[in-house]
Image: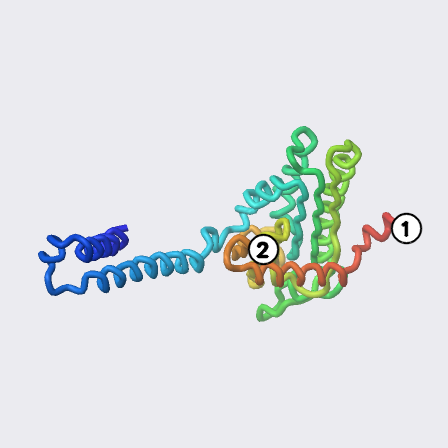
Amino acid sequence: MVTRVLLLGIFVTGLTAQFVKPVGDALEGKAYLGGALLSLVGYVLYDQVKELTSSVRAPTRALVSSTQLGSFVSEAFEARRVEISFLGYTGETLYNTLYHRLEDLLDRPGPTRRVLVRMLVPDFGQPMTVPSKVGEQDVPVDDPDFRQRMEQRCREYDGILSELAERLTAAGRVRVECEYRLYPGIPRDKICIFNRQQVLHGLYDLSARMRLHHLGDEYYDPKGYRTDLNVWSREGVAEAAVANWTKHFDDLWSLARQPRWRQGASA
């Protein structure tokens, strides 16, 4: 602000000296008009530099905790058409906040008329290094029982969300679809996409461990709620990044297969 006032003051003084003789005499020997024009150019350039600096400034929420997903879900549901996509481990962190927001639609649908939820989780029917049992010298050992435990959790989440979606759709005010699909591999990336406008991406801590019992075996078991997420938004300078992440998810979704529990239900 001070810089702007100073540059503008120089411009006005120089311009006045050019056309008002007493002022020009008082500033004899100065290049009035040239100095005035130079100060005006400086003023304009200063504004342009400020605007450029503002445009490349990092987003206000460059990094968030997974425990903050609720605010992104609430913001997404302000739209008429809501689309939420997830790729990760079990989706537990997102499921918890998503369930309550969908439940609110039964009494307070607001502007929302269409909701699509897509959840991509690992194929726990295949041998895996994560999740797995911690073996000798910390070597991961595939554990079918632990994988089945994770699969059952996803099955429960899918069942609860799908049942709620059917109730909302039957009520007639909002059409809701929720679906789980499977991708091959370990849960490395955590990705949440909101209305194709915002992408949150982070990496699970694959070294995280847990015990089912106090003195029981240890398991490699990433904790989604501890995963920090980078925020990319079309409103900032990351439109290309958002488009790439969204296309990547769409491609994975089209290649993913239905889980066994859904295949049984449709048979």
Judged from this view, the residue extending furthest toward the top is: 107
**Along the line of sight, the residue nearer the viewer: 10 or 241:** 10
Amino acid type indicated by mark 2: Val
Which label belongs to residue 56?
none
Judged from this view, the residue extending furthest toward the right is: 267
Q: Residue at x 67, y 60 (%)?
A: 249
**Along the line of sight, the residue nearer the viewer: 186 or 189:** 189
Q: Is residue 189 left or right of residue 13?
A: right
How crowded is the residue under tag 1: few (<14 C-alpha within 10 Å), some, or many (20+)?
few
Q: Considering only order in the chain, which callout, 2 or 1, is on the residue closer to the N terminus?
A: 2
Residue 235 in the image: state x and y as whole percent: 53, 52
Q: Kindly identify which residue carries mark 2.
A: 199
Q: How many marks?
A: 2
Amino acid type indicated by mark 1: Ala
Quadrant position of residue 186: bottom right
Q: Secondary structure at mark 2?
A: strand
Q: Mark 1 to mark 2: distance in Å?
A: 35 Å
Q: Is residue 165 left or right of residue 36?
A: right
Q: Is residue 60 left or right of residue 190?
A: left
Q: Does residue 62 show up?
A: yes
Q: Residue at x 74, y 52 (%)?
A: 180
Q: Kindly identify which residue carries mark 1.
A: 267
Q: Is residue 145 left or right of residue 14?
A: right
Residue 140 in the image: state x and y as whole percent: 63, 67
**Above or below 117: residue 88:** below
